Amino acid sequence: MNIQIKTCISPNFTSDDVDGTFDRAVDIFEDRMKGWFLNWAEDLYKRPHAGLATLHLLFSYFETISIYQRGEDSHNKSRLFFKEGFLSVFPNILSWQSDIRKEALTILYEHGRCGFYHNGMSKKGIMILDQNEPNFPKDTIFSYNPQYQIVFIDLNKFMPAIKAHFDTYIRRLKSGDIKAKENFEKALQILSR
């Protein structure tokens, strides 16, 4: 008896859809990231009391995107990859004073990323703003208060910024950006071991 099993490798692709082409690999990657993470986070963040669950999903993006952008494994380098991924999405933080930037990124990594992955929720130092917080500047996605060592995040802007970053990355891959393509292919090789 010959049993054939189709394995779902993303929400819209099965193992039968893999054809070995770069374009298909990008399509599958895009479908995985959107269908398993970003779209769920977008749906979730609109619901009451779902901010931490939304951040839990979103914080996986930064290290992941850095792996693909660098074409390297993040094993034993998750702090570096997380921070690079975060800066890739939010380059404006580079204009912050060096010590403030370092503190904020450390809190985001240790209290956010590590808190979510090792404790199931963030540690102190991460605060989600109410969608209508009147005291938070309208054009600000997140800010850092060094006196209290708290990073404030406005999910209404944080979520769309991550999705926009991902869409831009996918466009770079599809437009033939040679370095992006090479690193993406290296990441695929690393992650398929």
Image: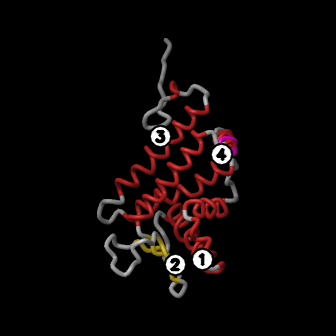
Toward the bottom, the furthest residue is: 147
The residue at which mark 4 appears reads as 180
* 139 left or right, relative to 102: left
- Which of label 1 and label 2 is nearer to you? 1
Provide the residue span drawn in magenta. 179-183
Name the quadrant of the C terminus: top right
Q: CA distance from mark 3 to mark 4?
A: 18 Å
Task: Using the rendered image of the protein, determine whether residue 190 is visible from the camera's viewpoint.
Answer: no
Helix, strand or loop at disc 2? strand
Tag 4: amino acid: Ala
Is 181 in the magenta? yes
| Residue 96: image tag | 1
- Which of label 3 and label 1 is nearer to you? 1
The residue at which mark 3 appears reads as 31
Residue density around tag 1, few if under 14, some if 14–19, many if 20 or more, within 10 Å: few
The residue at which mark 2 appears reads as 144
Tag 2: amino acid: Tyr
Helix, strand or loop at disc 3? helix
Say above or below: 107 vs 22. below
Q: Point out the tag, 4 or 1, that comes first from the N-terminus.
A: 1
Tag 1: amino acid: Trp
Tag 3: amino acid: Asp
Q: CA distance from mark 3 to mark 1?
A: 34 Å
| x then y, percent, for residue 59 | 51, 60
Say above or below: 2 vs 108. above
